Image (cartoon, rainbow, N blue to C red):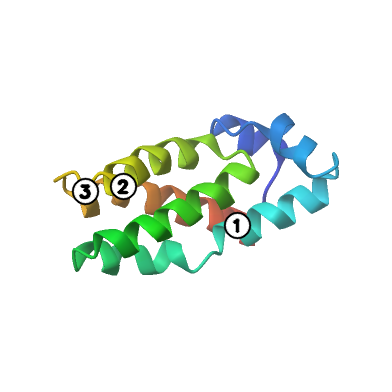
């Protein structure tokens, strides 16, 4: 179950996120759940593995925006870094970089469902 306390323990800026949601806690939790449910989280690993850098950039950039809007810094910050790497076509192990992002997203989504 999502609570402000659990989110804060994970480093999420709940005050900032709440402010963006008119300080309505239920609305904030709904927005978090919707953001974490974005299909790109599940599609991005395959796109990265296929080496489709431009498509992966578009997806990571979209996720960055969605996650940034609800102030989930532990996901936002690595998505920013990955987006920049993809933008400049850096040669890095993208699936390995994305794995912890996906894990945290999955953990948060599970928490939101309970």
Q: Residue at x 49, y 47 (%)?
A: 64
Q: Is residue 14 left or right of residue 40?
A: right
Q: Mark 3 and mark 2 in contact (Cβ < 8 Å)? A: yes
Report the residue marked by disc 3: 89
Which residue corresponds to the image point at 30% horizontal and 60% vertical from the top-left?
54
**Badge 1 or badge 2: first in the primary sequence:** 1
Q: Which image quadrant for residue 59?
A: bottom left
Label 2 Cα crowd, 10 Å radius (few <14 / some 14-19 / many 20+): some
Q: At which x and y percent is residue 31?
A: 70, 55
Q: Which residue is mark 2?
A: 87
Q: Residues within 10 Å of mark 3 (few under 14, many from 20)?
A: few
Residue found 19% across the figure and 43% down from its top: 90
Q: Measuring from the top left, give residue 67's x and y in whole percent.
A: 56, 48
Query: Image check: 70 left or right of 40?
Result: right
Is residue 53 or residue 114 the one in the foreground? 53
What quarter of the picture does the C terminus occupy? bottom right
SS class, disc 3:
loop
Q: Of the two numbered discs 3 and 1 on the same chain, state the one appearing first in sequence.
A: 1
Q: Nearer the viewer, residue 80 or 38?
A: 80
Q: Nearer the viewer, residue 55 or 112?
A: 55
**Residue 49 falls in which quadrant of the image?**
bottom left
Q: Is residue 114 visible?
A: no
Residue 93 pos. (x, y %): 16, 48
Task: Name the residue beneath numbered marker 1.
Answer: 35
């Amino acid at each position: 179950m999502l609570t402000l306390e659990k989110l804060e323990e994970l480093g999420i800026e709940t005050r900032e996120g709440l402010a963006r949601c008119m300080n309505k806690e239920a609305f904030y939790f709904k927005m978090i759940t919707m953001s974490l449910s974005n299909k790109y989280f599940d599609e991005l690993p395959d796109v990265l593995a296929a080496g489709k850098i431009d498509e992966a950039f578009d997806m990571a950039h979209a996720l960055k925006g969605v996650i940034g809007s609800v102030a989930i810094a532990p996901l936002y910050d690595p998505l920013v870094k990955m987006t920049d790497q993809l933008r400049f076509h850096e040669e890095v192990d993208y699936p390995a970089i994305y794995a912890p992002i996906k894990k945290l997203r999955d953990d948060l989504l599970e928490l939101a469902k309970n």
